[in-house]
Image (spheres, rainbow, N blue to C red):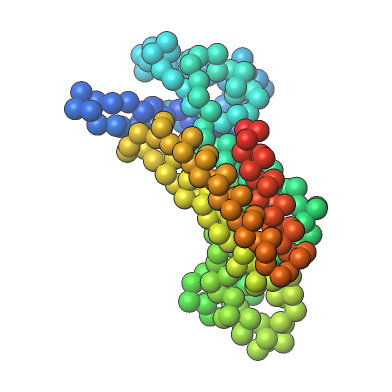
Amino acid sequence: MWTESYRQKSYITLNVHYITDEWKLVERVTATTEFNPDMRHTSVNIKQVVSNVLAEFGIDQSKAVFVTDRGANVLAAMDWKHISCSDHMLNTVLTTLFNSLDKCPCIKALLVGSKELVRYFKKAGLMRHLNTALKQEVATRWNTMFYLLESVLSNSNQVHHILTTRGEGYRMAAVDKPLLETIVPFPQVVKAASLELEATAKPTLHLPLPWFRKILQHCHSRSLVTSAVPTPVNCRCHSWSLVTLATELQLH
C-alpha cells in the first residue's frame, strides 16, 4: 500500500509469484487498485480488498503464501500463511538507526550536512560541473542513504573545489571526509543484501538467515576495527551505530 503525494490517493498492489510447469519462476502484477477513500486502512478493510482481488483472478487463498511489510494493520489482515518481507525489515532497521543518532552528533551532522549539500547543488544548478551527479536521500526508497553518502564521497574533491572557488567552502563544514570514508561501507553491505533479497527471477527464501549473519559479522568486525582508529569521538559514534544496527537486526 502507498499514498501518492499529489492528490493523496491511496493504492494497493498485489503481485503474484509462481512456478510454471517448466520450473520457471515468474512474477506478475495481479492488480493495482485505488483504495476506497471512504474506507479507513484497517485490517478488516485491507483483507476485504485483497480477498476481492484474489477472487477476481480465481486464486485459492489456502494455497498462497503472502509476503508483506510489518505494518500493524497489514499484519492483522494477514491471517493466511504469511512471511514478512526481509527487505522491508532491513529498511525499518536502518530507518530506526538513522532516526536515533542523538547519541552520535558527529554522524548526525554528517548526514544532515550531506543532504543540505546535495540540495544546494541542485538548487544552484551546480550539478553540471560534476562528473557524476550527487544523489539525494528519499525516505521511502531503499538504500538511498547509501547512494547519498557514496555520491558525496566520490565527488568530494570536485565539490570542494567548486565551493571554494565560489567562496562557499563553509557549505562543506559538516561533511567530515575521513568520517564519511568510514561510514560509507556501513550501509553498503545492507544494500548488497537488499538487492539480492529482492530478486524475482530466482528463489530467495533461503537467503535471509545467511545475510542476517553476514550483516551481524560486518557490524561487529567494523566496530572492532574503528575502535582502534585515533579519532575517539568519531570512532565511539561509529561503533555505537554498528552495535545499534546489530541490536535492531536481532530485534526484528
Relative horizontal placement of residue 243, taking residue 89 as reference (left or right): right
- The residue drawn where x is 61% and y is 49% is 220
- The residue drawn where x is 65% and y is 20% is 42
Give the image location of residue 103, x and y in percent.
80, 53
- Residue 42 sits above or below residue 203 on the image: above
- The residue drawn where x is 42% and y is 44% is 196
- Residue 174 sits above or below residue 69 on the image: below
Relative horizontal placement of residue 34, taking residue 98 as reference (left or right): left
* Nearest to the observer: residue 3 or residue 186: 186
Residue 120 lies in quadrant: bottom right
Image quadrant for the C terminus? top right
Give the image location of residue 87, x and y in percent.
52, 39
Residue 56 lies in quadrant: top left
- Residue 192 sits above or below residue 44 on the image: below
Residue 88 lies in quadrant: top right
Q: Residue furthest left?
A: 22
Give the image location of residue 121, x and y in percent.
62, 72
- Residue 105 sits above or below residue 202 on the image: below
Relative horizontal placement of residue 163, taking residue 157 as reference (left or right): right
Do we see residue 75 in this rendering? yes
Give the image location of residue 194, x and y in percent.
48, 44
Image quadrant for the N terminus? top right
Do we see residue 33 in this rendering? no
* Nearest to the observer: residue 56 or residue 110: 110
- The residue drawn where x is 62% and y is 35% is 250
